[in-house]
Image (cartoon, rainbow, N blue to C red):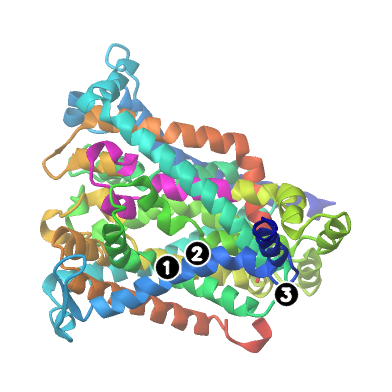
């Protein structure tokens, strides 16, 4: 009895320490957002003078600062926003379509060359995409696709990481579904779109967020392809407001908040499916 | 008339035949592989031996690009990248693992809440988050990091002016952003370990540390290999993080990575041949490091395949 009590005390202590560690990191994880939000409410000169702030001061802080987004270079921020959204939607929708298709094909069928193709997928995942930038850029110049949204998404239409993920996911599904569908008179494509895709929803959820993240955050390739200011994405555009000679804080901080908020809202709505999907399909061998 | 309507039927019949179906499913990847990977890779190799004077004009110049490669700027970017990649792998594989183990231990109240909260930084754009980190590591004594260091009894520094403290800022930012992602990868591996293995170990008298090294670690090996591999790749190919902290073409070149150098030479200076040589150096570096890592981790040993 006495020993058990001692044990419980020790466990409570450990639990306290463990939860404390998590709380500390939770603060670290959220701190930059707090800085971002509080600073976005302050006028640009205030930022220049005092740097980042963690306070909301009545009289100084106000949302009127966000008006800079509409006035800075004739509201170019919203053009950047539109570009980012268009590229994200194009890249994610097409990527999900092809990625799920190929991953499904590799997992569901046994055919000649399957192992070779899967090996190629793995090799491609190991090559840093950055080294392909220049020849791809040259290809775009030749086909006159520079400064074009389609040129930006072109290299991401059949994403290897999605193929890998969907393959892992489909490997865990019962193969009998294919036979059952065929008996019901579906073609193999019908089985995929009508039976399999609905079962794969958690995987689609996880991949939508990962792909959206990648696209929203992508800097290097869009920066190479896009050249007109109003076609820039948020990262490129925001990058142009940071220079060694001074930063446009009026637009930087509210712009940063506006770029973060929609993604976080989508994530909070979908996070259960997302984390479950990511865990179910992730690397198991 | 009949002939015209018959042909598409034949095509459809072929496309829906058992033999053709799997190939239709994987066809997008085959096209993509040839167009987006194989052709550009061959093209990069060829370009590294050429001088490129326009989209269609190029001259063969042999090894000249490689001879000119080892300039001061290139060596500096190589150092920056290697230093970053090393610490990236060390910190980003170990710290999230500790957190994942603690989260899985059942000692933490509200583990699911923390798991989703830790993921949020990964959703933000590095450029956007980088603005805050840039200011946090600012030169003024009142900048957040300097204020914290002073409060802990240290000296304020000009963090982003020097290679080693700049690297520290990069690692802090990377850890902030990727912690939640790696925790989820690790947790998926830990959850897949059968619980009776732990029970057996406990009966054998193994303490928690022994259980970690003899049950958890071997159990998550595939996940660990995956995390290390992508971290090596991400570490050596890092670019956006450095742009976020230093902007482009910063004086002195502190923080300029190999990819940053590649961009500068290939796009800003339009010397594509030289930039291709830089790119191939990066490719060889990543492949060698990952190969060594995979051999050390025993990835190619038969029993693990």
State whether residue B86 is above or below residue B289: above
Q: Are marks 2 and 3 in contact (CB under 8 Å)?
A: no
Q: Is residue B95 left or right of residue B125?
A: right
Quarter of the picture containing the C terminus of chain B is: bottom right
Chain letter for mark 3: A
Residue tagged 1: B35
Seen at 35% across and 26% down, the residue is A38
Distance CA(mark 2)–CA(mark 3): 38 Å
Seen at 36% across and 52% down, the residue is A151
Q: Main secondary structure of the magenta part?
A: helix
Q: Is residue A14 left or right of residue A175?
A: left
Residue B200 pos. (x, y %): 80, 71
Magenta span covers which residues? A207-235
Q: Are marks 1 and 2 in contact (CB under 8 Å)?
A: no
Chain letter for mark 1: B
Could you say which quadrant of the image residue B232 lies in? Answer: bottom left
Disc 2 crowd, CA 10 A, few/some/many (<14, 14-19, 20+): some
Residue A260 pos. (x, y %): 42, 35
> Nearer the observer, disc 2 or disc 3?
3
* Label 1 SS: helix
- Looking at the rendered structure, which numbered label has been put on residue B230? none
- Looking at the rendered structure, which numbered label has been put on residue A110? 3
Distance CA(mark 1)–CA(mark 2): 38 Å
Q: Are marks 1 and 3 in contact (CB under 8 Å)?
A: no
């Amino acid at each position: 009895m006495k020993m058990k009590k001692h044990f419980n005390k020790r466990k409570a202590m450990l639990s306290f320490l463990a939860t404390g560690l998590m709380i500390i990191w939770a603060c670290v994880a959220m701190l930059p957002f707090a800085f971002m939000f509080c600073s976005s409410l302050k006028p640009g000169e205030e930022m220049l003078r005092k740097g980042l702030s963690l306070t909301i001061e009545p009289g100084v802080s106000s949302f009127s600062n966000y008006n800079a987004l509409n006035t800075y270079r004739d509201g170019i921020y919203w053009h950047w926003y539109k570009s980012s959204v268009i590229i994200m939607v194009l890249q994610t929708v097409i990527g999900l379509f092809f990625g799920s298709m190929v991953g499904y094909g590799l997992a569901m069928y046994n055919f000649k060359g399957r192992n070779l193709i899967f090996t190629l997928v793995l090799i491609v995942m190991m090559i840093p995409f950055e080294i392909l930038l220049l020849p791809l850029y040259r290809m775009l110049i030749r086909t006159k696709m520079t400064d074009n949204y389609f040129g930006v998404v072109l290299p991401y239409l059949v994403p290897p990481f999605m193929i890998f993920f969907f393959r892992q996911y489909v490997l865990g599904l019962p193969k009998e579904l294919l036979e059952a569908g065929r008996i019901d008179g579906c073609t193999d494509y019908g089985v995929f779109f009508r039976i399999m895709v609905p079962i794969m929803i958690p995987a689609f959820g996880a991949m939508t967020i990962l792909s959206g993240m990648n696209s929203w955050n992508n800097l290097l390739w869009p920066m190479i392809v896009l050249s007109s200011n109003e076609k820039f994405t948020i990262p490129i555009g925001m990058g142009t407001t940071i220079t060694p000679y001074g930063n446009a804080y009026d637009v930087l901080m509210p712009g940063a908040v506006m770029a973060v908020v929609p993604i976080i809202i989508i994530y909070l709505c979908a996070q259960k499916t997302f984390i479950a999907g990511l865990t179910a399909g992730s690397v198991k061998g | 008339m009949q002939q015209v309507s018959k042909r598409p039927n034949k095509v459809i019949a072929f496309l829906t035949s058992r033999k053709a179906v799997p190939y239709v499913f994987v066809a997008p990847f085959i096209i993509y592989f040839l167009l987006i990977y194989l052709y550009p890779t061959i093209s990069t190799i060829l370009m590294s031996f050429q001088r490129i004077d326009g989209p269609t004009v190029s001259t063969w110049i042999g090894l000249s690009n490689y001879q000119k490669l080892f300039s001061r700027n290139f060596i500096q970017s190589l150092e920056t990248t290697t230093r970053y990649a090393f610490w990236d792998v060390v910190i980003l594989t170990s710290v999230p693992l500790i957190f994942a183990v603690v989260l899985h231990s059942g000692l933490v109240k509200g583990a699911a809440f923390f798991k989703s909260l830790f993921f949020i930084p990964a959703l933000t754009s590095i450029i956007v988050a980088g603005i805050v980190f840039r200011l946090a590591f600012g030169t003024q004594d009142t900048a957040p990091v300097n204020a914290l260091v002073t409060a802990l009894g240290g000296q304020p520094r000009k963090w982003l002016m020097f290679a080693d403290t700049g690297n520290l800022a990069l690692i802090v930012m990377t850890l902030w952003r990727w912690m939640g992602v790696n925790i989820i990868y690790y947790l998926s591996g830990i959850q897949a370990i059968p619980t009776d293995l732990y029970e057996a170990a406990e009966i054998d008298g193994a303490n928690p540390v022994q259980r970690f090294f003899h049950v958890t670690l071997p159990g998550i090996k595939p996940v660990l290999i995956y995390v290390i591999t992508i971290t090596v790749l991400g570490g050596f190919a890092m670019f956006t993080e450095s742009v976020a902290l230093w902007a482009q073409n910063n004086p002195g070149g502190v923080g300029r990575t190999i990819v940053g150098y590649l961009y500068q030479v290939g796009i800003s200076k339009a010397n594509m041949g030289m930039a291709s040589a830089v790119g191939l150096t990066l490719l060889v570096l990543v492949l060698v490091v990952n190969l060594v890592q995979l051999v050390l981790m025993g990835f190619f040993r038969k029993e693990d395949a």
